[in-house]
Image (cartoon, rainbow, N blue to C red):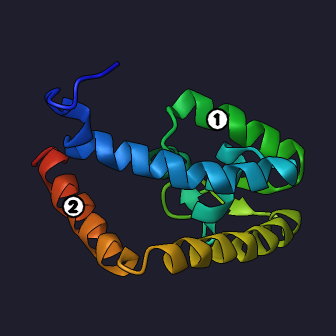
Amino acid sequence: MESQNAAPRFVDDYLLSLLARASHVISAEFHDRLRARGVSVPVWRVLATLSGGPETVTMLAEACLLQQPTMTKVLDRMERDGLVTRQQDARDRRLVRVHLAPKGEAMLNDLLTAARAHEAEVVARHPDVAAIKDLLRSLIARQGRRSRPRP
């Protein structure tokens, strides 16, 4: 039996742990819904990122929290399944941009509806979520500026 006077665990007050655990707990609910639809989390992340328009493979990997070789494998499967296409960039032929294919757009629209519904459920349970989202965007922006190499 644990002592009531035990010191709190470091991870229970450590920002990085709290962020990761909160994301994991809330995401798990939605990931279950994705699996029920036969959609993997990486495919969802790619589709959701492409909702803003075509992206390079490097930017997709960063946004989807995947290593570039893993992203390439995900995109190979998605292209084979007719969800995305890859095209050379018109201005910089060294870059490849990933575009949603019509089948991917249809899947995305359905998944965005499900994601918005899940987010509404989370917000209803946690009304202070808007302030949390603002804080997280600020943290990401500030940390992102600090981690980029300077010219």
Q: CA distance from mark 1 to mark 2?
A: 29 Å
Report crowding for label 1: few under 14, some 14 to 19, many 20 or more residues within 10 A (C-alpha). Answer: some
Tally the marks: 2
The reply to whether the C-beta atoms of the residues labelled 1 and 2 are less than 8 Å apart is no
Q: Between residues 148 and 28, which one lies in front from this camera angle? A: 28
Q: Amino acid at mark 1?
A: Thr
Residue 16 falls in which quadrant of the image?
A: top left
Which residue is the extreme one toward the top?
1
Given residues 99 and 33, the one toward you in this image is 33
Which of pointers 1 and 2 indicates the residue nearer the eye? 2
The image position of residue 108, as x and y in percent, is 76, 68
For label 2, the crowd category at 10 Å Cα-Cα, with few meaning under 14, some 14 to 19 and many 20 or more, is: few
Mark 1 lies on residue: 72
Q: Is residue 145 above or below residue 8?
A: below
* Residue at image location 67% in from the left, 46% down from the top: 41
Q: Residue at x 60, y 30 (%)?
A: 70
Relative to 18, is 149 on the left or the right? Answer: left
Q: Nearer the viewer, residue 134 or 98?
A: 134
